[in-house]
Each structure stands twice: as structure tokens, then as C-alpha cells.
Amino acid sequence: MCRLLIALAVWTPYQVAQAGMIGSEQMAQTSQTDRGAVMTFMARGDVAGELQSFGLDPATAKDRVAAMTDDEVRQLAGRISSAPAGADVAGLLLLIVVIAVIWWAWKR
């Protein structure tokens, strides 16, 4: 049993983890990039049309996105970037999530 464990330990790839400090400039740049991605998504014609069909003014939605915290924007930008391009169902679900987050932030 010990020989098997030694053999497996030798074959196991070791990865060296590195930790470092993240500067505030890098965090600010990342949050601005995420916020820009969400704003670009909100500016699309099909998204603005869907927001209007739900009775939400696109300008109000953009104001709500501007009022979101960096964590909320990061989560939303992650969902936008992970959605497959051209997927109608995924786009609709993403739109519903965007509207739900905007509604939640507005009611809060």
C-alpha cells in the first residue's frame, strides 16, 4: 500500500501557487471594464427593446446599473460573458436576470 501511495505521489503533478497583492488601480480598472461591458450590453437595440416591452425605460436601467456595487456588476458581467453568442434561450434568461437585478436594486 505504501509503495502505491509513493508511486501516485510521484506521478501527481505539483502546481506552485503564487499569491500577490492586487493594487487598487488594477481593481478599479477591472470594475470599470465590467461596468462598461454591462453598459454596452444595455445599449444594444434588442436589449433596450426588451426592457421597453417590460415597461422599463433604458435610461432608468442604465442609472440602476451605475448605482450597483462592484460585486453586483462583476457577477452580471460574468453572466454576460459566459452566455453563448446567438443563443436565444440564454439571451432571454440573461435579460430576465438583468431585469431582476435592476428591479432588486431599485426596490432596495
Image (tube, rainbow, N blue to C red):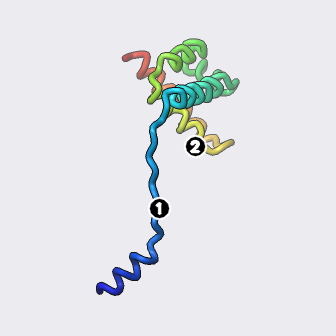
**Residue 50 appears in view:** no
How dense is the environment of label 1, judged by Cα within 10 Å: few (below 14), some, or many (20 and up)? few
Q: Nearer the viewer, residue 45 or 40?
A: 40
Q: Give the answer, above or below, for where 17 lies relative to 105.
A: below
Identified at 54% across, 14% down, the residue is 63
Side (left or right) of 37 relative to 3: right
Identified at 51% across, 32% down, the residue is 76
Local SS, label 2: helix
Q: Point out which mark residue 82 bears.
A: 2
Q: Nearer the viewer, residue 53 or 79?
A: 79
Local SS, label 1: loop
Q: Earlier in the sequence, mark 2 or mark 1?
A: 1
Q: Point out which mark residue 80 bears.
A: none
Side (left or right) of 92 relative to 44: left
The quarter in which the N terminus is drawn is bottom left
Which amino acid, mark 1?
Gln
Q: Residue furthest left?
A: 1
Q: Nearer the viewer, residue 39 or 87?
A: 39
Identified at 66% across, 22% down, the residue is 43
Q: Give the answer, above or below, for where 5 lies relative to 41.
A: below
Which amino acid, mark 2?
Ser
Residue on which disc 1 sits: 15
Identified at 55% across, 17% down, the residue is 61
- Residue 104 position, x and y percent, is 41, 22
How dense is the environment of label 2, judged by Cα within 10 Å: few (below 14), some, or many (20 and up)? few
- Residue 8 position, x and y percent, is 40, 79
